[in-house]
Amino acid sequence: MSIGKDQNDYAEGIMKQLNELGFRADFDDRDETVNKKIRNAEMEWIPYLVVVGGKEVEAQTVSVRKRLIGQPIKKNQTSKQVNNIPFDKLVAMLEEDCKGFPRRKLPLPFRYYSRRISFRL
């Protein structure tokens, strides 16, 4: 997800690179606040949120919000924030955490949230 429209091209490029590497990645291109995007992603149990802002575009890095799975919750903390890491470190983290899990393409890949069907009112 991007902070603003200025970072959409960079965020879309990251999504495409992750998809080429066999990871399921979508791009939240909706015109919503970042807090709402994060809240919606957490409600959908998305394990990794890659957040891109102006600093990340300038430094060619990403910030990752990683869901804490299988760990005890401490003081209502359900995720860990890792800021300003290079793309190759993100890929290494994903490779390590996804080791032993199958990589299958989605039958109907809705890569952009603005085009995704929503049944919630």
Image: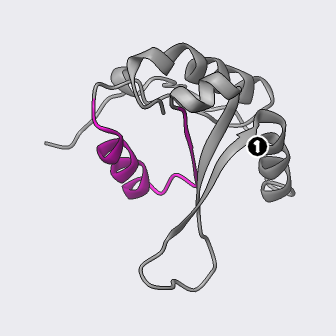
What residue sits 59% from the left and 29% below the top?
107
Q: Tell me residue 47's x, y (percent).
A: 58, 55
Q: Nearer the viewer, residue 61 or 97?
A: 61
Q: Is residue 92 left or right of residue 79?
A: right
Say which residue appears at 47% left-offset and 75% top-offset.
Answer: 77
How many numbered markers are drawn? Answer: 1
The residue located at (57%, 86%) in the rendering is 72
Q: Quadrant of residue 15?
A: top right
Residue 119, percent from left and from top:
23, 39
Span colored in magenta: 32-52
Q: Is residue 94 magenta?
A: no
Instruction: Say which residue label 1 marks.
Output: 90
Q: Is residue 116 left or right of residue 119?
A: right
Residue type marked 1: Leu
Instruction: Name the quadrant of the C terminus.
Output: top left
**Where does residue 19 sit, x and y in percent of width and height?**
70, 27
Q: Is residue 84 above or below residue 73?
A: above
Look at the picture and state if 49 lies above or below 105: below
Q: Secondary structure at mark 1?
A: helix
Q: As drawn, is 94 to the left or to the right of 25?
A: right
Q: Where residue 8 sits: x, y (%)?
A: 49, 18
Write down the quadrant of residue 31 in the picture.
top left
Q: Nearer the viewer, residue 58 or 50?
A: 58
The residue drawn where x is 79% and y is 54% is 98
